[in-house]
Image (tube, rainbow, N blue to C red):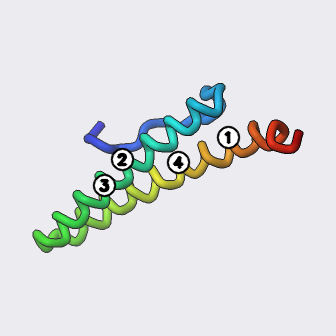
Amino acid sequence: MKPNEPKTHDVSAVVTPQEHHTHAAEHFEQAAQSHKEAAKLIEANDQAAALARLKVAQEHATKAQEHVTEVSKKTAPIAAK
C-alpha cells in the first residue's frame, strides 16, 4: 500500500462521537496531504499522477464525511433533549 492510500473503511467499528471526530480529522489531514502532493505533481507537469492523487484526496474527504454523518446520527438524540 502506498502512503496516503485509503484503507478499507468501516465506520461501524467507531463507537464514540470523539472517535468519529478524530477519524474525520485524520481523513481530512490525509486529503490535504494528497492535495499538496497533487499540486507538486501538477507543477512537475505529471497530470496523470496528479489526477490519481486527487482521487485519493476525494476518497479521504468522503470517508471523513461518513464519520461526520455517523456522529450526527449518534448525537442528534442527545441534542434534541
4 or 1: tag closer to the N-terminus: 4
Q: Residues within 10 Å of mark 2 (few under 14, many from 20)?
A: many
- Measure the C-alpha gap from mark 4 to mark 1: 11 Å
Q: Residues within 10 Å of mark 1 (few under 14, many from 20)?
A: many
Q: Residues within 10 Å of mark 3 (few under 14, many from 20)?
A: many
- Measure the C-alpha gap from mark 2 to mark 1: 20 Å
Q: Residues within 10 Å of mark 4 (few under 14, many from 20)?
A: many
2 or 4: tag closer to the N-terminus: 2
Label 1, on which residue? 71
Relative depth, front residue between 43 and 20: 20
Label 3, on which residue? 34
Label 4, on which residue? 64
Q: Amino acid at mark 2?
A: Gln
Left or right: 22 in relation to 3: right
- Measure the C-alpha gap from mark 2 to mark 4: 10 Å
Name the front one of labels 2 and 1: 1
Q: Quadrant of the N terminus?
A: top left
Label of residue 79 in the image: none
- Measure the C-alpha gap from mark 1 to mark 3: 25 Å
Left or right: 12 in relation to 36: right
- Measure the C-alpha gap from mark 4 to mark 3: 14 Å
Left or right: 78 in relation to 51: right
Q: Are marks 2 and 1 in contact (CB under 8 Å)?
A: no
Q: Amino acid at mark 1?
A: Val
Q: Are marks 3 and 2 in contact (CB under 8 Å)?
A: yes
